[in-house]
Amino acid sequence: MDGRADRCYLNCNTKTARLAAFFIAFVVMIFSGAAYSQNTSNLYNPGQSKIDAQLKTWLANTEHVGEANITVSMLDYRLKIQDCERPISFDFPFASHKTVRAKCDAPAWQYYLQASVVQPSSGTPPTAPAQAKPPQTTPETLSPNPNSSAIQTSSALAKSNPTDQQTQVAPKLTTPATNSGVHTVLTSPQFLKRGTILEPNMFIGTEVASQPGDMSALSNPKDVVNMELLRDLPANTPLKSFDLKPMVMIKRGQLVIVSVGEGKGFLISIRAESLQDGQLGDQIRLKNTESGRSISAVVTGVNTAKAM
């Protein structure tokens, strides 16, 4: 019996030790995976350096700022960015100037990057009370000088309608909240499938914690106009600049309404067959369905173009 008890004791201890070792290895694996995910999310794509250098020079000349004050968001480190054989071209594809499109002709590629201008600090800002309390002017202290009529009018308006005065001061008092580590981004309340043509009413503004160096999340609803979703977007997920691309408004083989003579004293519309795909503003080739002649036109909308 003693021998059996000893063997049972040894076997039990061995099993306990194995379970403990397995549990420790499992915990280490989880934390290692989390650490790896966090580290890889901050990796800088080596192919982006040449884009950044040219982008900052272009943006500095366009916005009249110094290159040192420009910050550019990081692209996904898994993207294989090919060297451009020609100078990269840049433009603002959206109404706001927060997103810059980098485009290369050889080889053909384009990427959307979030760029912002950080203004240098100019000292301690004035305190809120100094802004919130304009100088008080009473009828007894008004100067009889005729040139002071503007001051009298402003004082009278301020005293007669104090609510408007408070409304003007309030934004100044709440401005520092934008730098409190929270900003508003666009999210969709429902799942959006890849290839969806986006509209502003599909999104709502959601406050999220700011992440230093990450400016890819979109916040302006106008930035999604005439854009197409590149990947499935789960509900309540911030929309990023690299999640979308300009939609194809004219597809090859489709019939297009082409305006001819605009700005020349006459205007007619003809039907033409598109010979290539085109996005808004692209110059494409079409074929007149009646005469068979080839014409050039600029894409102006969905299945519409203007002859050159």
Image (tube, rainbow, N blue to C red):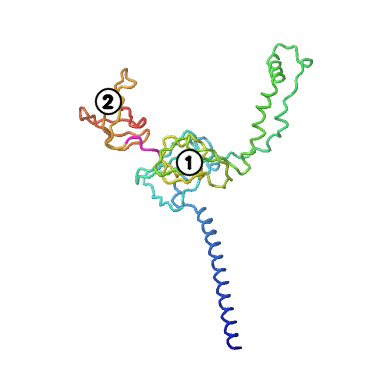
Label 1 amino acid?
Thr
Label 2 amino acid?
Ile
Please state which of residues 177 and 195 is positioned toward the viewer in this rendering: 195
**Which residue is depicted at the point 46% across and 52% down?**
77
**Against 268, is 293 above or below?**
below
Compared across the picture, whether 212 is left or right of 191 comes to right
Please state which of residues 52 and 297 is positioned toward the viewer in this rendering: 297
Compared across the picture, whether 167 is left or right of 216 comes to right
Query: For the view shown, which residue lies furthest in the left direction?
Result: 291
Q: Which secondary structure, mark 1?
A: helix
What label does residue 270 carry, if any?
Answer: 2
Q: Position of residue 250 (x, y in %)?
A: 33, 35
Compared across the picture, whether 301 is left or right of 177 comes to left
Q: Position of residue 196 (x, y in %)?
A: 41, 40
Give the residue at mark 1. Answer: 57
* Magenta highlight: main SS: strand
Q: CA distance from mark 1 to mark 2?
A: 44 Å
Which image quadrant for residue 126? top right
Residues drawn in magenta: 245-250
Which image quadrant for residue 276? top left
Query: For the view shown, which residue lies furthest in the front direction?
Result: 1
Check if residue 181 falls in the magenta segment. no
The mark nearer the N terminus, 1 or 2, is 1
